[in-house]
Image (spheres, rainbow, N blue to C red):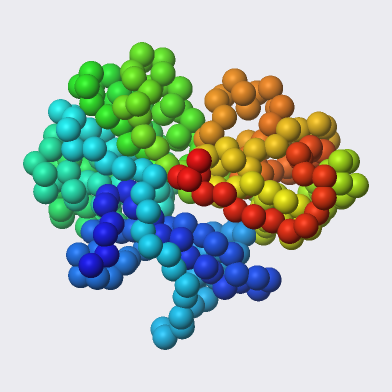
């Protein structure tokens, strides 16, 4: 029996043109029939993960890891607001089904740029009916997140998964409403930002390095490839373990994490190397490591 609670994900070692990359994908559904289902959107700006998954053919073998959950759903609240953007529906879908089965009071607001960017919408409409509300950007529809928070019971919880802008707005509006931080739960797929992915350079004076970061690779991956000894965890901009100080940047830093606060990101003093980027030029960073002897991972759950 596969033990997977709503909000769980699996890590998959995805084959790419360069080397296998570890990617996390939310489970879609409860895995009750011993099958793990995931949904992978093919992205033009992919760093290799989604393209690698879309190239797979029936019968190919993959290395996957046991389901884990850093986006747990609680069942003891009088009211729930679920907020999803695009492919961020994957963990929210499973939560909605679980809350429906539990007889809980909840609403699901699901937004995307176009109707073709609303996977699982038909299934949700069948399963949860009027609890679902869709918002299509190209039709001029937008979620009034502040207004929706105001309708939520004071003891209710908000669950969010979607692009960086949606997450950032939800966090700010939740705080402005004076809601408890512990009643806001979120997850990010860590691949969207203020501008398109493009090549840039990393400078590490302590190690005498200048490293090229291709458009399809993250800063963290480029540092690992260069042998820099990194501490890391989620690879989604959530845990902050891979954060490093910024010494200088020749262009605006696109902070795509959800670990640092809006105020901390505005100071431009640190960045999460797993998701943040520059549109061009170079960023000079510091690292506590003085030698390049390989790299190691650090599981946030073990700290």
Is residue 116 visible in this depiction of the protein? Answer: no
Q: Nearer the viewer, residue 258 or 1?
A: 1
- Residue found at the far front of this picture: 302
Q: Position of residue 88 (x, y in %)?
A: 40, 48
Q: Quadrant of residue 28?
A: bottom left
Q: Quadrant of the N terminus?
A: bottom left
Is residue 37 visible in this depiction of the protein? Answer: yes
Q: Position of residue 215 (x, y in %)?
A: 70, 56
For residue 65, above or below residue 236: below
Q: Residue at x 86, y 46 (%)?
A: 207
For residue 42, above or below residue 103: below
For residue 253, above or below residue 290: above
Q: Residue at x 36, y 59 (%)?
A: 67
- Residue found at the far bottom of this picture: 59
Q: Residue at x 33, y 18 (%)?
A: 179
Residue 74 lies left or right of residue 254; in this view the side is: left
For residue 196, above or below residue 252: below
Q: Nearer the viewer, residue 285 or 90?
A: 285
Q: Position of residue 34 (x, y in %)?
A: 24, 70
Q: Position of residue 210 (x, y in %)?
A: 87, 50
Q: Nearer the viewer, residue 131 or 24?
A: 24
- Residue found at the far right of this picture: 208
Residue 91 lies left or right of residue 274; in this view the side is: left
Q: Residue at x 53, y 69 (%)?
A: 14
């Amino acid at each position: 029996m596969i033990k997977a609670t709503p909000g769980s994900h699996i890590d998959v070692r995805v084959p790419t043109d360069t080397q296998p990359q570890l990617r996390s994908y939310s489970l879609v559904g409860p895995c009750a029939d011993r099958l793990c289902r995931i949904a992978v959107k093919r992205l033009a700006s992919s760093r290799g993960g989604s393209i690698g998954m879309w190239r797979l053919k029936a019968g190919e073998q993959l290395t996957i890891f046991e389901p884990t959950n850093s986006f747990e759903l609680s069942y003891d609240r009088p009211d729930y607001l679920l907020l999803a953007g695009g492919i961020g529906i994957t963990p929210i879908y499973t939560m909605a089904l679980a809350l429906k089965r539990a007889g809980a009071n909840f609403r699901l607001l699901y937004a995307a740029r176009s109707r073709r960017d609303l996977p699982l919408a038909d299934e949700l409409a069948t399963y949860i009916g009027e609890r679902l509300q869709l918002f299509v950007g190209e039709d001029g529809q937008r979620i009034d997140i502040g207004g929706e928070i105001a309708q939520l019971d004071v003891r209710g919880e908000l669950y969010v998964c979607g692009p960086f802008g949606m997450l950032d707005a939800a966090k700010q509006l939740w705080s402005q409403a004076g809601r408890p931080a512990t009643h806001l739960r979120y997850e990010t797929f860590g691949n969207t930002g203020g501008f398109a992915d493009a090549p840039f350079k990393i400078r590490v004076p302590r190690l005498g390095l200048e490293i090229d970061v291709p458009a399809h690779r993250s800063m963290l991956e480029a540092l690992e490839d260069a042998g820099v000894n990194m501490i890391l965890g989620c690879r989604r901009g959530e845990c902050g373990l891979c954060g490093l100080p910024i010494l200088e940047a020749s262009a605006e830093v696109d902070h795509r994490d959800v670990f640092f606060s809006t105020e901390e990101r505005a100071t431009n003093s640190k960045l999460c190397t797993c998701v943040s980027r520059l549109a061009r030029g170079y960023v000079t960073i510091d690292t506590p490591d003085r030698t390049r002897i390989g790299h190691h991972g650090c599981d946030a759950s073990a700290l």
